[in-house]
Image: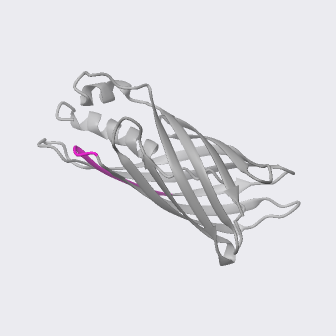
Amino acid sequence: MQLLSQSEFRQLAQDLGGIASFKGLASATPLGVTGFDVATSLSWSTLAHREVWNKAAAGLGSPSAVPVPALRLAKGGPWGLDVGVMASTVPATGAQLSGAELRWALIEGGPVTPALGLRLHATRLSGVKQLSLGTSGFDVTLSKGFALVTPYIGAGALRTAATAQVSTALAGENLSTSRLFAGAHLNFGLFDVTLEADRSSDLRTVSGRLGYRF
């Protein structure tokens, strides 16, 4: 970390923000007042600035991609509102990630009409002595159900706040980036699956989710 210039630290923070952000992995359709969703997920982010990661690791090498497994829980509420939380331990790093989200179905959709939803989300990275990092953002999602499959698309903004916690002249970074994503939710009755691809600045992520709704 101490070897990085300010611009390189900004690039590192940009990648980390995209990796650490709370992936929606859901259509715009609400869970409903009695709905629960319990799931596991795995996101795989391809690094946009691998040479910076290698320099931050003092030349010891860096991966080409970072996997982030997570446990997720969501609860439906009235007025089309859902709340959700997630927790993760990033493999081989000791870093922990926790997050929360609030989803609101502006249009709940129906047999012939699409659903439109707004989502607010935030995460916090812990367990990394050299860095303090948090993210927050919002998404707008449009989806339409077809039998067992509900495809969706969306866009949003992501804010990343990063501060180096080592003896260095690096200033903290507050970054704002756009986010685009598309996916599909598949309902198989006893379980459901979501597949999603997203892009935050130059960082590309693919994610999968396996869950149970009741």
In terms of secondary structure, what is the magenta stretch mainly? strand
In the picture, residue 38 is in which quadrant? bottom right
**Above or below 94: residue 107:** below
At x 61%, y 53%, the residue is 39
At x 70%, y 61%, the residue is 116
Residue 50, image x, y percentages: 37, 26
At x 79%, y 49%, the residue is 188
Res 207 seen here: yes
Residue 185, image x, y percentages: 72, 48
Q: Nearer the viewer, residue 178 or 136?
A: 136
Range drawn in magenta: 128-137
**Left or right, 118 with reference to 16:** right
At x 67%, y 78%, the residue is 78
**Above or below 104: residue 97:** above
Res 201 seen here: no
* Residue at far bottom of view: 78
Q: Does the magenta stretch include residue 134?
A: yes
Q: Is residue 136 magenta?
A: yes
Residue 54, image x, y percentages: 30, 25
**Left or right, 182 with reference to 119:** right
